[in-house]
Image (tube, helix red, strand yellow):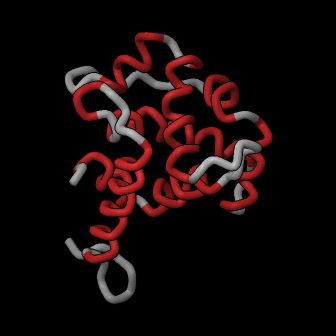
Amino acid sequence: MNDKLSTLLDDPEVRELIFAMASVTPPSGAPVASRLHAVLLYLAETTTKEQYGSWLSEDAVNKAITVEQVRTTIGDSAIDDLAQLMSASPGIVVWQLAAVLPDLVDAVSPGGQVVDPDRLAREIAEASADDDRSAGSFGSRVH
């Protein structure tokens, strides 16, 4: 089990954002985990080497991503779709993505490489199931 991913998905807003990001249908019609995987890999091309490298490193502090880099990576159309799915403004979604994407890449890149789409799907499902099992009867986490 990936503790970093599980910790990320513990936050309901982050969980909703990641699931929404995986649900937005690009023209390719690729499976959900494959789409999310492609975005995470595409970040290597739309960010600096230092930024992306910090997310892959077990030892480095994750460097921030800019809103413009998020827009370049995700695209305005997909951001609008995400905003609609989340009932939020595109501006809020972009800021949320900027806050989450470095940690998401970090969480799904043990050993410095982003896991394959099948493992990504399993890890998200396992982290989500674990989070659901640890929720109290009214949906709040038991601590």
- Give me the residue at 35% from left, 77% from top: 140
- Quarter holding the C terminus is bottom left
Residue 11 drawn at (x, y percent):
40, 59
Q: Residue furthest top?
A: 49
Q: Nearer the viewer, residue 25 or 55?
A: 25
43 is higher (above) or lower (below) than 81: above
Residue 57 drawn at (x, y percent):
27, 22
Q: Quadrant of residue 121?
A: bottom left
Q: Is residue 89 left or right of residue 66?
A: right
127 is higher (above) or lower (below) than 52: below
- Give me the residue at 53% from left, 60% from top: 16
Q: Is residue 9 left or right of residue 111?
A: right
Q: Is residue 20 left or right of residue 100?
A: right
- Give me the residue at 53% from left, 25% from top: 43
31 is higher (above) or lower (below) than 139: above
Residue 112 drawn at (x, y percent):
28, 25
Q: Quadrant of residue 69?
A: top right
- Give me the residue at 43% from left, 17% from top: 51
124 is higher (above) or lower (below) than 137: above
Q: Nearer the viewer, residue 123 or 142?
A: 123
- Quarter holding the N terminus is bottom left
Q: Nearer the viewer, residue 8 or 21?
A: 21
Residue 61 drawn at (x, y percent):
30, 24
For the image, the number of numbered tags is 0
Q: Nearer the viewer, residue 113 or 127?
A: 113
